[in-house]
Image (cartoon, rainbow, N blue to C red):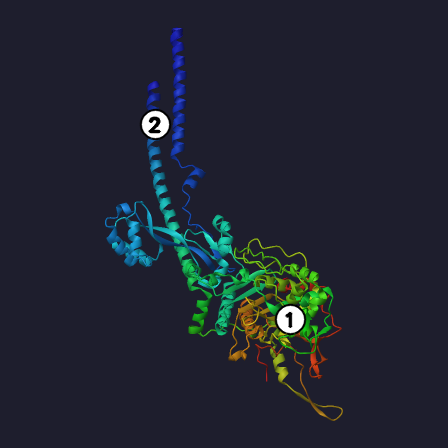
């Protein structure tokens, strides 16, 4: 019995040792992988930082403005280019504005009637008033 | 086991078993510990293997849209171990040929030294690094370090400042917020909008160049929040090469400068006189004769030589009228208002470059008179925009600031009443619509403002030196959202201005160009015609007799019986930005 016990414990110790060795080796390799991943991440992060900086240099507002003027013909926006949605006249209002109604007043005078335009409709600098 | 075994043997066996059990337990314990050590355990392992952080030594500084203003960038530095250098003389000669800005003699001294480590050149370019590698010299090595760079160059130079070779902040926010930048890796967000900043700088630079001015400053303040959208001081410098900048270039006019701004102060004078009730909108003063106090005589630049209404005193910028108003108000009350406007104390912006206002001490009666039209008291441009914000909003927004985190609190005491603020906005509108500020009129927006032209003081008095031309505007003036200030230092008039160099001719058109460009940039809708009508309704034409010719002349006056507060008490909260934001 003692012999059996002894053999069993030696076997357990040997197997345990092997498993332990294999596991340790695996951990070591994984750690190596992890480290090289970290190195890669770090160099990517540095590269991203570099690119962001270069982007910021290329994206300077003054430079963009110069390039836009030189190559695309863009100009700084003018206040007249922004219009409130409510200031845009309805098409019917635009049409009615150009219509005149000729009437004869009770006094015998002739007059031409037209729709009174909303004040803000046609006087916005960004809108061309209808003829 | 047989029962007739010697009791001693039984005892011995039992003891043996106990000893065996103890050893077995110890062995198992050792085994467990061994496994425990071999397996990477939870947190400790993660900590030990944490990625080497790419976190820069200093946090980035970005504008309100997240665009980079200052960041760390890896740059190589070259160093030597003189003990390993074979031929110091030849090495020095070869290195001097490829390293820009380092002399051969200097290198030779370093390479023949006793120390085992000497920097040859910090922060070399990649071209220099390649050239040094190609030389293949023994004992010469590189170290890559994070180096502060400013991708936008001079655009926000005075604000952001710069760092020294060891990455320590030396000026601006880099120095003022050194601890925040080194302790907390999160981006430091400024209130500046680089688009607005660029517009202000470009237009200011154009004006400084055209009028051959010594320099200038330009500020755009958001009244809703007290956030500075743009702040430019010219001449400026490139923080990437701050060593080459002169003292004049490094000087931040907006925070360090202390200027007598002249007529701009009439805005404050009329605000306090109206607020204290010593004068009403329909009152006026005789400006046909000079104002005299002791040996001092005060005259008008744009002399009309007649009775001037309060609106005309502002719109035509009458020194005599402003002096009489301040005289009626008294020095004590004037100082109280100045203090509440923040004109007598250092501005709390938090930049290390901050100037103290020049305040007369003691404050004599003549100081009260000259301060009324902006002489004898010097303040920084930042203080002016804050004071204007307080005067036209009544309840002032938080003081002007550039760092978005931890904004200063709302200023608690109103500077003037809501009604005074409304009247002041009308007076500023009048100055642009009918007065000296006509060149600041922006088609499409309702702008109000005030011109300033001050003789610069120097040794020997005020005469013979240039002027400081300024213009401060608020827009849209019916419910102000932004304050814009432009100051030009010693501008010279040209043919386009008929030789005039005053604020109305030089600074006002610059403000006009800035507003017409940043208005669309910040998405401000164009003027509402009904808003302009409110201002027109309150303007009537009166008559006043000219003291010199005896003729009766048309004069601008405020309508006597119209309310200055529109709506049902909502004006107080809605006078400025915050209400505009919520629509």
User: Dot 2: what SS?
Assistant: helix
Taking B412 as reference, is A90 above or below it? below
Q: Is residue A21 above or below residue B166?
A: above
Q: Chain of mark 1?
A: B
User: What crowding class fits label 2: few (fewer than 14 Cα within 10 Å), some (14-19), or many (20 or more)?
Assistant: few
Q: Is residue A56 left or right of residue B402?
A: left
Crowding near pointer 1: few (<14 within 10 Å), some, many (20+)? Answer: many
Residue B108 in sight in this render: yes
Residue nearest the viewer, comparing B213 with B32: B213
Q: Quadrant of residue A21?
A: top left
Q: CA distance from mark 2 to mark 1?
A: 95 Å
Question: Which element carries disc 1, helix, strand or loop?
Answer: helix
- Image-quadrant location for residue B103: bottom left
**Going by the image, does B229 lie left or right of B71?**
right
Q: Which residue is mark 1?
A: B428
**The disc label shown at residue B559, or none:** none
Name of the residue lying farthest toward the bottom = A108
Percent position (x, y) of residue B261?
Answer: 59, 67
Which x, y percent locates residue B565?
A: 72, 67
Q: According to the image, label 2 marks what residue? A: A13
Callouts 2 and 1 on one subunit = no
Given contact means CB atoms under 8 Å apart, are the residues at marks 2 and 1 in contact?
Answer: no
How many tags in the picture?
A: 2
Residue B266 picture location, percent across and down: 65, 68
Chain bearing mark 2:
A
Residue B260 position in % (x across, y down): 59, 66
To which quarter of the image does residue A89 belong? bottom right
Depth check, mark 2 against mark 1: the one in front is: 1
- In this rendering, is residue B430 above or below B87? below
């Amino acid at each position: 019995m003692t012999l059996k016990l002894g053999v069993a414990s030696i076997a357990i110790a040997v197997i345990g040792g092997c498993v332990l060795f294999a596991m340790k080796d695996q951990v070591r390799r994984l750690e190596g992988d992890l480290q090289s991943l970290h190195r890669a991440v770090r160099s990517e992060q540095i590269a991203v930082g570099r690119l962001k900086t270069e982007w910021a240099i290329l994206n300077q507002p003054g430079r963009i403005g110069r390039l836009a003027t030189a190559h695309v013909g863009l100009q700084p926006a003018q206040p007249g280019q922004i219009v409130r949605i409510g200031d845009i006249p309805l098409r019917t209002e635009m049409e009615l504005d150009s219509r005149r109604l000729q009437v004869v007043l009770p006094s015998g005078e002739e007059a031409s009637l037209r729709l009174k335009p909303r004040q803000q409709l046609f006087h916005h600098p960004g809108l061309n008033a209808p003829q | 086991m047989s029962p007739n075994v010697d009791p001693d043997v039984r005892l011995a066996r039992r003891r043996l078993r106990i000893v065996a059990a103890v050893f077995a337990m110890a062995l198992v314990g050792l085994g467990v510990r061994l496994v425990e050590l071999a397996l990477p355990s939870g947190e400790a392992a993660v900590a030990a293997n944490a990625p080497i952080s790419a976190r820069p030594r200093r946090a980035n500084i970005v504008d309100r849209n997240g665009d980079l203003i200052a960041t760390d960038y890896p740059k190589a530095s070259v160093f030597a171990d003189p003990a390993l250098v074979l031929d110091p003389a030849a090495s020095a000669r070869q290195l001097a040929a490829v390293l820009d800005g380092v002399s051969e003699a200097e290198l030779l001294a370093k390479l023949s030294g006793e120390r085992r480590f000497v920097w040859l050149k910090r922060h070399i370019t990649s071209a220099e690094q390649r050239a040094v590698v190609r030389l293949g010299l023994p004992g010469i090595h590189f170290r890559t370090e994070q180096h502060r760079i400013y991708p936008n160059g001079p655009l926000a130079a005075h604000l952001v400042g710069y760092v020294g070779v060891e990455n320590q902040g030396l000026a601006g926010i880099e120095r003022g917020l050194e601890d925040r930048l080194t302790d907390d890796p999160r981006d430091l967000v400024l209130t500046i909008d680089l688009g607005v900043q660029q517009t202000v700088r470009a237009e200011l630079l154009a004006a400084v160049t055209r009028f051959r001015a010594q320099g200038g400053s330009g500020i755009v303040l958001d009244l809703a929040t007290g956030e500075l959208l743009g702040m430019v001081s010219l001449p400026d410098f490139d923080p990437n090469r701050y060593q080459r900048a002169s003292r004049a270039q490094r000087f931040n006019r907006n925070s360090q400068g202390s200027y007598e701004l002249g007529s701009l102060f009439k805005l404050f004078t009329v605000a306090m006189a109206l607020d204290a009730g010593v004068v009403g909108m329909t009152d006026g003063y005789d400006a046909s004769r000079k104002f005299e106090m002791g040996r001092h005589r005060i005259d008008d630049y744009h002399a009309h030589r007649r009775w001037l209404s309060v609106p005309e005193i502002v719109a035509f910028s009458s020194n005599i009228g402003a002096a009489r108003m301040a005289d009626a108000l008294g020095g004590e009350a004037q100082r109280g208002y100045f203090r509440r406007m923040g004109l007598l104390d250092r501005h709390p912006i938090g930049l290390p470059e901050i100037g103290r206002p020049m305040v007369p001490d003691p404050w004599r009666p003549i100081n009260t008179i000259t301060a009324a039209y902006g002489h004898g008291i010097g303040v920084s441009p930042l203080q002016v925009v804050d004071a204007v914000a307080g005067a036209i909003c009544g309840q002032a927004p938080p003081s002007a600031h550039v760092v978005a985190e931890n904004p200063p609190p709302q200023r608690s005491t109103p500077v003037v009443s809501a009604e005074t603020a409304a009247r002041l906005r009308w007076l500023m509108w009048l100055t642009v619509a009918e007065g000296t500020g006509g060149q600041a009129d922006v088609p499409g927006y309702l702008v109000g403002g005030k011109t300033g032209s001050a003789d610069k003081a120097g040794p020997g008095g005020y005469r013979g030196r240039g002027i400081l031309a300024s213009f401060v505007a608020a827009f849209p003036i019916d419910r102000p959202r932004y304050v814009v200030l432009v100051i030009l230092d010693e501008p010279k008039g040209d043919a386009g201005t008929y030789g005039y160099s005053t604020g109305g001719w030089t600074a006002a058109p610059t403000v006009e160009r800035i507003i017409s460009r940043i208005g669309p940039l910040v998405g401000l809708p164009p003027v509402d015609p009904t808003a302009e009508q409110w201002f027109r309704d309150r303007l009537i034409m009166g008559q006043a007799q000219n003291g010199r010719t005896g003729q009766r002349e048309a004069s601008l006056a405020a309508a006597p019986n119209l309310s200055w507060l529109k709506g049902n008490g909502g004006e107080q909260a809605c006078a400025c930005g915050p209400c505009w934001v919520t629509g």
